[in-house]
């Protein structure tokens, strides 16, 4: 069984919700490309006119210049800074490339993430003010942004800091390269902040940026697989950073470094992935009850702990003991008790050796095919969605696996998307051009398949036998170095 490091469950949890909930940002919006039909002067006038006229009264507006007929664009808002209550909005992009976003902000002001394509930006929104972010797609497909309107200086600094903390943009970098990238972006963000005239805002964001920087560096340094030439001072540096975290401060709560602090305190607990998480999660509740007084962070942890138990544990071992303790721990948050009650009542069956449910999948061309058509070979199924960051992070490993095992005539690889937005799925396929079969499951089919196999979260990997029976309903991930040997042994 794969072990989770002392950081594992918290990093994995943070990753999942940053990408599964927060990164539902990667949903396709439609717009018509208009640049060719106007001269540069006309285009500039159009952009100015659109923002000044259409954008008045909105919290955020701007224009998007992009190639093709589609653009990935969305705004991510976390009420009261709680990443587990993230709300994602998809502003309409009209035929001129103009967009506008507005809502009532209970707190009066907030920061939001803005995702366009695979690029991350951010904006400081205030009720009664309008921030303007204009995006332009570059020849390499990435986006640049110009900032104007209210709080333009803050928004430029926020965007630089957001990019400094975007670990998914660094997944192809080495640890050393990631650290250098983060340092440079963070320095640029602080330089922009230094020019902000409002001393109160400048001081607040400087403190927040430094806390986020610390959290990102801790995540990089605590990766399970370290580079061979890792500096010997890492452990000392990590300890100093961790000891500087105040888990009850609002700044560390907003920077998510409070969660890292909790992970450090749990360093002696190392549950097995899909094993018994009851003791680990009960210990988390005891720790929070004993030291955490910040009400915002206590609420966040109430969701975090329940999700850890049901998403990463085996779902059954110690369930009664955990649930009894959890209902007392989360009594001030009945919405969370209600949200996880279905998971508590769910009975997870071991389906290994049972026939796979007879479902029908859809191909990219719209044709449909039964899962029974996969019979005849061992089948490794990747269950994923475009909005799921960890899913997308596994795709390069699937690609390498397919190439490495292409001569194994007894084995085939397929991917099942559970996207609710077919256009998002098609756009991702067009971009990645995977060399193995792709299918999408509609909502009802996904429910039948997931309920039968006890799938409560993605990514998930399933192996079927040549006769259509389930060999492994929770198979190792493509990124697991042991998977190749496992598959070779299975199919020999």
Image (tube, helix red, strand yellow):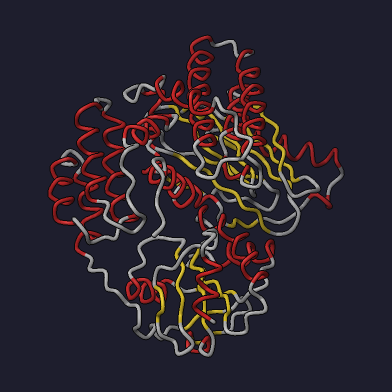
Toward the viewer: 352 or 289?
A: 352
Residue at image point 69% right, 67% down: 433
Looking at the picture, how far across and down is residue 178, in whole percent? 63, 36
Horizontal placement of 479 versus 447: left or right?
right
Q: Position of residue 287 (x, y in %)?
A: 23, 33
Q: How many numbered circles does the render carry?
A: 0
Q: Residue at x 64, y 21 (%)?
A: 187
* Foreground pick, 28 / 451: 451
Residue sitting at x 67%, y 36%: 177
Q: Is residue 202 above or below residue 385?
A: above
Residue 300 on image: x %, y %: 31, 38
Quarter the N terminus occupies? bottom left
Q: Quadrant of the C terminus?
A: bottom right
Q: Nearer the viewer, residue 343 or 71?
A: 343
Residue 268 visible in the current orientation = yes
Q: Is residue 359 left or right of residue 299?
A: right
Q: Residue at x 41, y 36 (%)?
A: 104
Please, is residue 12 above or below residue 358 in the view? above
Above or below, 290 against 22 in this view is above
């Amino acid at each position: 069984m794969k072990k989770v490091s002392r950081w594992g469950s918290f990093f994995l949890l943070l990753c999942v919700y940053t990408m599964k909930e927060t990164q539902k940002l990667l949903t396709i919006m439609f717009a018509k490309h208009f640049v060719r039909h106007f001269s540069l002067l006309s285009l500039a006038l159009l952009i100015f006119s659109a923002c000044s006229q259409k954008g008045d009264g909105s919290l955020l507006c701007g224009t998007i210049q992009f190639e093709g007929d589609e653009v990935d664009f969305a705004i991510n808002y976390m009420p009261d800074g709680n990443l587990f209550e993230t709300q994602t909005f998809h502003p309409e992009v009209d035929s001129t490339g103009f967009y506008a976003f507005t809502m009532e902000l209970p707190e009066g002001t907030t920061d939001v993430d803005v995702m366009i394509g695979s690029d991350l930006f951010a904006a400081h929104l205030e009720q009664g003010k309008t921030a303007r972010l204009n995006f332009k797609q570059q020849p390499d497909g990435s986006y640049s942004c110009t900032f104007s309107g209210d709080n333009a200086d803050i928004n430029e600094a926020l965007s630089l800091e957001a990019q400094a903390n975007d670990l998914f943009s660094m997944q192809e970098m080495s640890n050393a390269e990631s650290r250098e990238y983060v340092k440079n972006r963070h320095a640029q963000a602080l330089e922009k902040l230094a020019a902000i005239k409002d001393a109160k805002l400048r001081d607040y964001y400087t403190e927040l940026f430094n806390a986020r920087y610390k959290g990102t560096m801790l995540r990089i340094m605590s990766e399970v697989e370290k580079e061979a030439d890792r500096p010997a001072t890492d452990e000392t540096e990590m300890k100093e950073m961790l000891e500087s975290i105040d888990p009850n401060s609002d700044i560390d709560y907003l920077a998510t470094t409070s969660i890292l602090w909790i992970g450090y305190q749990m360093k002696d607990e190392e549950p097995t992935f899909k094993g018994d998480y009851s003791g680990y999660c009960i210990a988390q509740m005891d720790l929070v009850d004993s030291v955490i007084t910040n009400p915002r962070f206590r609420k966040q942890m109430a969701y975090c702990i329940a999700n850890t138990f049901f998403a990463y544990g085996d779902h059954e071992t110690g369930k009664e003991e955990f649930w009894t303790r959890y209902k007392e721990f989360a009594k001030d948050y009945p919405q969370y008790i209600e949200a996880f009650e279905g998971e508590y009542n769910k009975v997870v069956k071991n389906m290994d050796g049972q026939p796979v449910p007879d479902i029908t999948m859809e191909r990219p061309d719209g044709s449909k095919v039964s899962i029974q058509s996969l019979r005849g070979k061992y089948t490794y199924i990747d269950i994923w969605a475009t909005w799921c960051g960890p899913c997308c992070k596994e795709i390069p490993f699937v690609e390498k696996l397919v190439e490495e095992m292409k001569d194994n005539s007894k084995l085939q690889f397929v991917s099942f998307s559970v996207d609710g937005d077919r256009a998002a799925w098609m756009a991702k396929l067009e971009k990645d051009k995977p060399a193995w079969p792709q299918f999408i499951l509609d909502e009802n089919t996904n429910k039948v398949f997931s309920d039968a196999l006890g799938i409560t979260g993605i990514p998930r990997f399933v192996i079927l036998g040549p006769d259509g029976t389930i060999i492994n309903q929770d198979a190792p991930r493509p990124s697991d170095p042991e998977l190749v040997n496992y598959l070779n042994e299975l199919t020999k």
